[in-house]
Amino acid sequence: MLEKLWGTIPVSPETRGSKVFGAVGKRWLHVIARYAPLPPAARAELHRRRGVAVGKRVFIGTEVFIDDAVPHSVTLEDDVTVIAQATILGHTYYPQHFHRLLGDESTRAGLHTTIRRGAYLGLRSTVLAGVTVGEYAIVGAGALVTEDVPPYTMVVGVPARPVREFSPEDVDAR
């Protein structure tokens, strides 16, 4: 029965059995956070209720997608800015026929995506699972972040590559 609903993507422990009701509720919170005309602080609070670790003074724009299957696999530290239509993934699932090639859930267990203090994610940027974006790093619009971004570094492109480094003195961190 589950295969008819989910296809060949394995069902995570967070959605097995009766836990599916809580997972569905969290996905509805995600829909509201993404599309409802809310102030950014209200969006941040909805993501907290979903299980995302969200720090203080976090700005989350409209249509931001933060992992909806395993929200606790994402951390947004204090003073992070996530501009509209950005995507932050915290986990990966692959169809069973790719497990020998890409690994199964046990080989990818423990992935966590962290956006460090003061970092900025530009419009339509994407951060893949397991990546850390360093303190006060800047991810340019449309960038695809596949590797960790060092602190005080600007990255752009697909895949994202460093284009500028700067110092803490260049940032007005209050």
Image (spheres, rainbow, N blue to C red):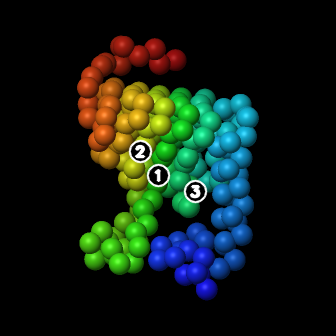
Cα separation, mark 3 vs mark 1, equals 8 Å
Residue 38 in picture, x, y percent from top left: 73, 34
Q: Amino acid at mark 1?
A: Leu
Callout 2: 10 Å neighbours few (<14), some, many (20+)?
A: many
Q: What residue sits right under mark 3 in the picture?
A: 68
Question: Mark 1 near mark 2, Cβ–Cβ under 8 Å?
Answer: yes
Q: Amino acid at mark 2?
A: Val
Q: Residue at x 37, y 36 (%)?
A: 143
Residue 163 in picture, x, y percent from top left: 26, 26
Q: Is residue 96 left or right of residue 36?
A: left
Q: Residue at x 66, y 72 (%)?
A: 19
Query: As rendered, which of 121 and 125 lies closer to the eye?
Result: 125
Q: Is residue 135 visible?
A: no
Residue 22 in picture, x, y percent from top left: 70, 66
Q: Residue at x 48, y 73 (%)?
A: 9
Q: Amino acid at mark 3?
A: Asp
Element assignment for label 3: loop
Residue 89: give its label. 1
